[in-house]
Structures are given as structure tokens and as C-alpha cells.
Image (spheres, grey):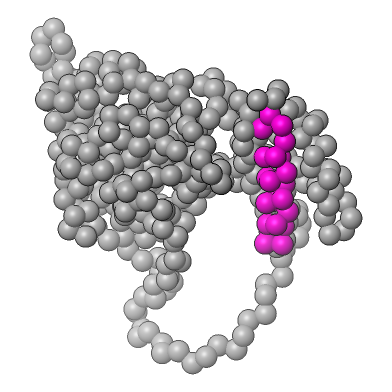
Amino acid sequence: MSAEPNKAAIEETLRRIALPDGRNLVEAGMVSDIFIADGKVFFSLNCDAEEAQRFEPVRQAAQQAVTAMDGVRSAMVALTAEKKAGTRAAPPPRPAPSPQPQPAAGTRRPVTDRPKAEVAGVKHIIAVASGKGGVGKSTTALNLALGLKAAGLKAGILDADIYGPSLPRLTGLREAKPQQLEDRILKPLEKFGLQIMSIGFLVEEETPMIWRGPMVVSAITQLLREVAWTDLDVLVVDMPPGTGDAQLTMAQNVPLSGAVIVSTPQDLALIDARKGLKMFEKVNVPVLGIVENMSYFIAPDTGKRYDIFGHGGARDEAARLGVPFLGEVPLVMAIRETSDAGTPITVSQPDGPHAAVYQAIGARIAETLAEGTTARPAPAIVFE
């Protein structure tokens, strides 16, 4: 392959893409900072919110032009729609409303869900989320995927934690690169009987992902829909921590079968977990349950139990909110050591007590999916 292009060469290519007013993309100031890593090019095009639809062909042209450059393996271009400061888009004219039956006083009117395009090759998608980082969400997501596999399902996992992808390390695939098929579709890597994809396979481990929200959303969408998933019963998605734009967009646009919330027992973590749960409820994604990670510690020398972060907080919170409590995962060195070594405990010690916890969680979720029901239908968003 030719040498990796620099920003100046990419900008020169973008100067050849004309806008309706006669200027090119660079002259118009639409191009954001250009990020280049291992032959991959990432940038966004800025426009006004009301012009977003009109500029979609321009975005496609820019992505195709950069992809065709020597030394470029792929390009990811997002359209960043922003309103100009101090302006407000005029609302479109509304047609005269047709007579509709009015709800009785005191009743609620639900908001209708928008249709969500299915993901090719995937039957069910489960989001594993947390209200904050540092609660062991990624380790839980991988072991959950392996627990679902142990329950007899064909499973895959997508590392959608763009800012801190950890799946390459957790699976021991740090040096692996996915194969690119036709039409820019990527073939997922496979290990432990799972189909696996992560942004970490496309950039170096120490490369910081300094991206704006729309770039993150675009990257997650492409990793989900431009990967050749094959006959999966369930795809586990390791979500970014928090409840920001990426998480909300994912929940709104992907046909999620449900969400699993990961928390530690202490009150501060539970406050953030509660926010994550409420976010999924707001967009009508069923909550499959809560997992309490780092639930307790057993001293390896004495066997004595210590509730370092408190105990039972997630169980109590699940009962209070009326969602299933899926299980307690202890804080043990073996889980940390096997994760760092790229051999998760459900693989390295499949008959051990800690793997049994994840397998039980996977079996419970598999049963819920097989029943064709969800643990708890999320309430509709309503207007009083």
C-alpha cells in the first residue's frame, strides 16, 4: 500500500468537491479536524441543522473521494448539523389537523416509536450499559456474551465504547485486523466461538479518540451496520459509559431487544445506573435487568468475605424499580487476571464458581429471549 496521506493531501482532495454556491468544502469551512490512523481517515462536515438533508450527497461524495485516495484503507465521514448561534429554524407549515378522538380526561397519550432498521445477520441485540465508567461493564459484557453462547445461542459482541475500546485486550486480539470485504463491509474477527468487532481493531491502542458526538454516533452506526455478522442469535453491544448523545442515538435507532445495566453496590454508582435505566425507558427499550459487579471480596488467604463497596445495593435498587436482578459478580483477582491476559474467566475456568455466575445470567437472558418477551416493558413517554 502507498504511504499514508497527510491532512494537506486530504484537504486538496476535498477542494475538488463543489458546493451549490460555487465554493468547495474547504473554502466553505465545513471540514472539521482530520484524524488519520493506520490508513483510516475520520472527519466531519459542519452545516446548519436545516440543511442536513440537502448536504447528505455531499457527505457521501467526500467519503468516496477520500476512500479512493492512495494509502487510504477506509474513510468515515459524519455530517455535523448545527444551528447558527442566535438563529432559530422556522417550523414547517402544519396541515390542518384532521378530527381525532380525544382521550378521556386523566388518560395519557403515548408517543409512537419510530421504525428501526434491522441489522443484517442479527436476530437480537442487547445493550450492556452503565451510568458511569469504572464499574467493569466491558468485562461483564464479554463474559455475558460467552454465557449466552454457553446457553446454546450463537453470539457476537460489538465494542461500541469508542473512547475506550477494551475488547482487543480482553480477547487477546490486540494485533488483529479485520478483513475488508466488498462494499467496505468488514468481516468480524472470531475467537472463543464469538463474532467480534471493535474500533480498537482499526486504530492503535494508545491512539486517543478525540471526536465530537456526531463522529462517535457515525462510527458506532458503521461498526454495527457495515460488518458481516452471520446468523447471530444475539449480539451483545458494550455501550460507552454514561447517558450522552451516543447512547441515546444508539437506543433510538437500533432495534434493541433489551438492555442490561451494570453497577457496583455503592450509592453513587447506583445513582448513575438509575440514570442509564431511565434513559432506556424514555426510548422504550426494555430493561432486562441489573448486574451487581464487584459485589463482594473473598480474601484468598483466609476466605473471609469483605463488602468493600457495600453489598446488595443493586439488588435493592432492582426491587425498588421493579426490574429483574440478574446476579452478583464478586471482586476476585482471577476475573481481573484472566481479563488482562485475554482469556476471560468463562473460557479459562468454565467450570469454576465465577464463570457459573456469568453463565447463569446468560441462561436467564436466553430464556427471556426464547419466550419472545422482555423482562419489563418500558413505559411509554407521555404528554399530559
In the picture shown, does residue 360 fall above or below 354?
below
Residue lying at 15% horizontally and 11% vertically, measured from the top left: 300
For residue 178, side relative to residue 365 (left or right):
right
How many numbered discs, if any? 0
Instruction: Identify the image quadrant of the N terminus.
Output: top right
Q: Which residues are magenta?
A: 52-72
- Is there any visible trace of residue 272 in the rendered image? no
For residue 257, side relative to residue 5 (left or right):
left
Residue lying at 55% horizontally and 88% vertically, measured from the top left: 97
Q: Position of residue 89 (x, y in %)?
A: 71, 65
Task: Please identify the residue farthest to the right as the structure is shown.
Answer: 22
For residue 167, side relative to residue 299 (left or right):
right
Q: Position of residue 116 (x, y in %)?
A: 44, 61
Residue lying at 50% horizontally and 52% vertically, measured from the top left: 249
357 or 87: which is nearer to us? 357
Residue 12 lies in quadrant: top right
Q: Magenta stretch mostly in which secondary structure?
A: helix
281 or 154: which is nearer to us? 154
In the picture shown, does residue 191 fall above or below 187?
above
Task: Please identify the residue farthest to the bottom as the structure is shown.
Answer: 99
Q: Position of residue 150 (x, y in %)?
A: 18, 37
